[in-house]
Image (cartoon, rainbow, N blue to C red):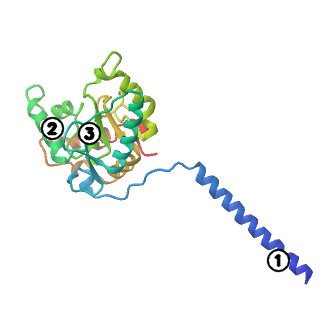
């Protein structure tokens, strides 16, 4: 009987030890893992910007002091993160002002077709004209601004953010601190690490915890043939807009 009792006690303690080991490993795993925001599967219309952010439950209006422009909307998570970054910047005497936020397919179409008409003389060929517009403007249905994750800050000219420019200190601050709040510059200077895509945009910042997942879903779901409904849309396939422009971003801004 004594032998059996000891045997049972050994089994119990051994099992308890295993349970403790498993719990310890689980806590260690939890402590070392980096939490990443998960975006549930969204409709194709959302990825293409074909929805109304003013009526979408995940979007909120952006007002003063964060922007001086009416009609600005962002995804709730993006806006909450931006407000924290805004407050931190204010403490360092840096003023961040949103000048462009969520843009729908129709809003992007207006921008695109305005340039399509304006560049007709200098770039008469469809593909040549599309590539000219694509230096700084996305085709409707391919813009990161559709997702409510991306913002343009303060100015739309790179020189303003360079040494001697009005917002040079703002750009320096963003480079040092934006990542702590989840923001990343998707369109850095083109080079070996980013050979494709739009030209550098120092004003454009993206909330990576959401945008990374949405980009992944976009690349799995959207094909060039689905990018339609505007002048010059036939060039999307020739240029491979999805691979070269939607995916042609700073690697640090992609899903981890």
**Picture coordinates of residue 171, whole percent (x, y):** 37, 26
Give how far apart the Cα atoms at labels 1 and 2 are: 76 Å
Q: Is residue 33 left or right of residue 214?
A: right
Work out whether mark 1 precedes mark 2 in sequence or the reverse, and give the earlier one: 1
Q: Is residue 193 visible?
A: no
Q: Is residue 182 above or below residue 8?
A: above
Tell me whether the residue at label 3 lies in contact with that at label 2, contact meaning CB atoms closer than 8 angstroms: no
Q: Is residue 93 visible?
A: yes
Q: Secondary structure at mark 3?
A: loop
- Which quadrant of the structure image shows residue 178? top left
Q: Secondary structure at mark 1?
A: helix
**Picture coordinates of residue 44, whole percent (x, y):** 26, 56
Would you call the spot at circle 3 few (<14 residues within 10 Å), some (14-19), or many (20 or more)?
A: few
Work out whether mark 3 precedes mark 1 in sequence or the reverse, and give the earlier one: 1
Would you call the spot at circle 2 few (<14 residues within 10 Å), some (14-19), or many (20 or more)?
A: some
**Picture coordinates of residue 212, whole percent (x, y):** 39, 46
Q: Which residue in the structure is indicated by mark 3?
A: 64
Q: Which residue in the structure is indicated by mark 2?
A: 111
Closest to the observer: 67 or 152? 67
Q: Which residue in the structure is indicated by mark 1?
A: 8
Closest to the observer: 208 or 57? 57
Foreground: disc 3 or disc 1: 3
Q: Is residue 64 above or below residue 191?
A: below
């Amino acid at each position: 009987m004594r032998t059996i009792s000891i045997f049972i006690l050994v089994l119990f303690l051994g099992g308890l030890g295993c349970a403790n080991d498993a719990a310890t490993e689980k806590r260690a795993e939890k402590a070392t893992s980096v939490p990443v925001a998960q975006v549930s599967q969204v409709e194709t219309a959302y990825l293409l910007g074909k929805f109304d952010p003013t009526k979408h439950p995940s979007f909120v209006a952006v007002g003063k002091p964060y922007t001086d422009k009416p009609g600005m909307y962002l995804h709730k998570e993006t806006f909450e993160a931006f407000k924290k970054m805004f407050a931190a910047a204010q403490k360092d005497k840096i003023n961040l002002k949103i000048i462009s936020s969520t843009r729908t397919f129709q809003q992007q179409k207006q921008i695109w077709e305005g340039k399509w008409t304006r560049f007709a003389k200098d770039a008469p060929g469809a593909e040549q004209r599309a590539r000219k517009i694509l230096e700084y403007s996305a085709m409707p249905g391919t813009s990161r601004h559709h997702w409510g994750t991306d913002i343009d800050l303060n100015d739309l000219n790179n020189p303003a953010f360079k040494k001697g420019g009005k917002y040079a200190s703002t750009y320096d601050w963003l480079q040092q601190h934006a990542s702590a709040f989840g923001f990343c510059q998707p369109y850095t200077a083109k080079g070996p690490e980013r050979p494709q895509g739009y030209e550098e945009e120092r004003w454009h910042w993206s909330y990576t915890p959401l945008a990374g997942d949405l980009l992944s879903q976009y690349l799995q779901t959207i094909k060039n043939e689905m990018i339609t409904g505007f002048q010059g849309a036939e060039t999307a396939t020739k240029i491979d807009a999805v691979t070269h422009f939607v995916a042609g971003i700073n690697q640090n801004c992609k899903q981890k």
